[in-house]
Amino acid sequence: MKRFVFLFLLSIHFAVFSQESFDEGVAVASMTMSSNNAEVQGQLAMMGDMSTTTYFKGDKTRSESNNLMAGETITIIDAKAKKMLLLMNNMGGKMYSKKDIAPTQEDLDKMTVEKGTETKTVLGYECQQYFVTIEEGGMKMTSEYFVTDKIQAVSEQFSGYGSKLEGFPLYMVMKMNQPEAEITLTYEIKELRKEEVSDDKFDMTIPEGYTELQVPNPQN
């Protein structure tokens, strides 16, 4: 009986703690991709599941992922300055891209956000369902998010949404419909830790040895 009471009280402690609101810490997520196209699915299967570690502090965030096929990717966002730095280190070499992330009115007009009727509990946090649809260049992307307002952090996924969608997503399913294939990406936070994060994590200085990523102009 005493053991039962102890375990019951312990479960209440963790339930209360898991609902704690904080704005500095670390989130670890898993990401899987699949496709209804057999050839594309084969390529995605070679990549395997990916893990992303996100460090957040106030209005800044840094996400790190490393995969045998995709290589290393680091994304640093300063929401106050509206800047994003992308660092990639893969078979193509070391490349970077630094850009503004403030969405234009044209970007926002291509997007619709709808609040869903469901909730989902992830790591003890009750998350609200939202649907986002973006149509551009003949491609339609639909996303389902489960969002908490307890984690006061910048979300890489929401960086281009302006004020249309706020909060921190703990679970996400994104579908990209293209003529040749549909690709589904599932993203879920597996671990949350409240801890101090060094400001060095958010330094946007371009590391030595990186060259700027050249994005082809679609009009050429």
Image (tube, rainbow, N blue to C red):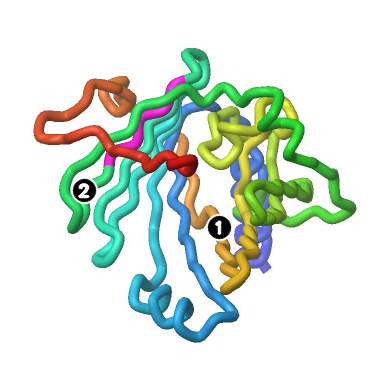
The one of 80 and 167 positioned closer to us in this rendering: 80
Q: Which residues are magenta?
A: 83-87
Task: Give above or below for 133 relative to 185.
Answer: above
Query: What's the residue type where badge 2 is placed?
Result: Asn
Is 158 contained in the magenta span? no
Few, some or many residues within 10 Å of mark 1 (<14, 14–19, 20+): some
210 left or right of 191? left
Given residues 4 and 173, the one toward you in this image is 173
Q: Residue at x 62, y 31 (%)?
A: 21
Q: Secondary structure at mark 2?
A: strand
Question: Residue lying furthest front in this view?
Answer: 220
Quadrant of the drawing holding the C terminus: top left
Q: Main secondary structure of the magenta part?
A: strand
Q: Position of residue 176 (x, y in %)?
A: 62, 61
Residue found farthest to the right: 117
What residue appears at the point 72 percent right and 34 percent down from the top-left corner? 165
Judge whether 204 appears above or below 125 on screen. Answer: above
Q: Nearer the viewer, mark 1 or mark 2?
A: 2
Tag of residue 89: 2
Q: Quadrant of residue 78?
A: top left
Which quadrant of the structure image shows residue 56? Answer: top left
Dot 1 corresponds to which residue? 188
Q: Which kind of residue does numbered mark 1 sit on?
A: Glu
Residue 179 to residue 9: above or below: below
Mark 1 or 2, nearer chain start: 2
* Picture quadrant where residue 208 is located: top left
Front residue (pair 51, 209): 209
* Mark 1–mark 2 CB contact (< 8 Å): no
Task: Provide the secondary structure element on which disc 1 rests.
Answer: strand
Q: How many marks?
A: 2
207 on left or right of 2: left
What is the residue that sits farthest to the left in this orientation? 209
